[in-house]
Amino acid sequence: MKSIFKYTFAFSLLIGSVSCENLDTLNEDPNNPEVVPSNMVMSAAEKLIVDNVYDQWFSLRQCLSYAQQIGQRNYTDEDRYQIRETTNNSYFKYLYLGLSNLQNVIDLNTNPETATLNSLYGNNQNQIAAARIMKVWLFDLMTDTWGAIPYSEALKLTSGGDEVYAKYDDQKSIYADMIKELTEAAAQINEDEAAFTGGDVIFGGDAAKWKKFANSLKCRLAIHLSKVDSNWKNYIAEALESGVMTSNEDVAEYKYSTTGTEYCCLFYEPFFIDRRNDFSILKPFTDILSGKADVLNKKKHPWENVVDPRLKMFTVPRKDGSYDGLMYAPPSAIQVSSSGSAPSIKTQKLFYMAQDFAVPLMTYAELQFILCEYNNYDSEYYKAGVKASLDYWSSRSGVSVEDETAYIDAVSANVDAEACALQKYIDLFTNGTEAWTEIRRTGYPEQLIRPGEIVGVVNDKNIEFSPLEEVKGDIVARVKYPVDESTLNGDAFYEAIKQLEDGTNNSYSKMYWDVRKSTYDHPDNL
């Protein structure tokens, strides 16, 4: 039996370790150094992670579809929750590769034999802290996708080269440790010294911004736990005391380059490298942005007839001039026949399809909505969140002060759980995993299509959303474990499956923090 960690550490050791053999210098290849500086390892880790999360598979064909923001024009299997197994296996492997590279940064700055050399590329403790923070960001994404995953033993090798078969840790213990990691990492940072002298694309080596990100991310994890952990407010209070994002200048984002296709944003790739037109904005999302009620399913909109300024930033009109998105996840035959009238977001090359799009890992606006909920849906935090989101997204397209003020006033008449969740959902555009997490946690937006509901009308016939995976009447609750794990980490894999509902590797077992009793249930915080 082999382990998935054989792959992760083979890659990690390839780019970041010192050879154990004493080779003659004549046999050294100057183009393939045996020792790679920690800042370059961090740079490679950031790109590997972002490339594999914000791409046409994990994001466009999966999480953004689960969030019903972007869907497929021609193929609807993933939109209907049936993902390709080879893709699922790849996700799992490459995300752990990213984690192993982050661990490599930590090891290079911890080991006395390499720490002194790597202090040239940034304060050792700051480098360690930044890598710990990114590990939490990625582990959170992974556990909120699959549920219990290898965590405590995932990045360990035993002495003598023995392989590791890592257990699957339950989400309760994973979250507890992630909170601890963020707390310690924030305290570890020396803001007077650089985290990295180069290579860090996310914050340019700014240690103070890494600290703010750690504490803001702690707030995100705390709000995830707000239905299941009575200490969630304490976590946020600790984060606020330590220091969180204070403006859009602190947003955690990875900005791609226009230098060649190798360094371009992978939202750009399917349209302009693969030369396909597979994706379009979805109708549930454009209806929310347009202030339209869902008359087919008799659902109201909290701000009917209020048009969101972000509508024209996120999409383009159909040929008839209307802002009406693509029908969500109908059977494939209907999808092909109806996709011709869908808005072609490729034609105007919207900002998130640019080669150098800055992918947001966490926005300042999201933090404001978290603090709105933390403060019992305080209207000032809510308004600050809406304004921050409009300002952040309009920096690409522009919106007048008058239009911004009018919109904020229109959506602030009643600040409650639905208003806060809906505005956060809109701000999380392009961040499909977190949007999907919030839908599962809160039950909002209600305007999203659930199984059995009507997605559209074709030839006077109602077309219903019919998933290809059993989800028991709700949106998909989790992604199934990849089948490669059954042979690569079999004992742990089967033990993890025993803990799922019905003891099967299914798509309906809920996350630890998802306590909803039904698809439209909106549980209160503790």
Image (spheres, grey):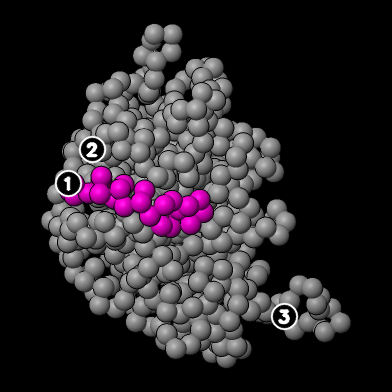
- In the image, what residue occupies the spot 54% across and 84% down? 122
Q: Nearer the viewer, residue 396 or 423?
A: 396
In the rendered view, tell whether residue 66 sits above or below residue 172: above
Image x and y of residue 292, in percent: 32, 30
User: Residue 157 appears at what percent x and percent y?
Assistant: 51, 69
Q: Secondary structure at mark 3?
A: loop
Q: Nearer the viewer, residue 515 or 293?
A: 293
**At x 17% / y 46%, what residue is drawn?**
414
Label 1 to label 2: alpha-carbon separation:
9 Å
The residue at 58%/81% (across/down) is 197
Few, some or many residues within 10 Å of mark 2 (<14, 14–19, 20+): some
**Secondary-structure class at tag 1:** loop
Front of the two marks 3 and 1: 1
Q: Nearer the viewer, mark 2 or mark 3?
A: 2
Residue 21 numbered tag:
3
Question: Of the residues under marks 2 and 3, which one precedes in the sequence?
Answer: 3
Question: Callout 1 environment at 10 Å: few (<14), some (14 to 19), or many (20+)?
Answer: some
Asked if the residue at tag 2 contacts the one at tag 1, i.e. Cβ–Cβ closer than 8 Å, the answer is: yes
Per the image, the residue denoted by label 1 is 414
Span of residues in magenta: 391-417
Residue marked by disc 2: 302
Q: Is residue 401 magenta?
A: yes
Magenta region, main secondary structure? helix
Between disc 3 and disc 1, whose residue precedes?
3
Q: Residue furthest right?
A: 26
For badge 1, the amino acid type reads: Asn
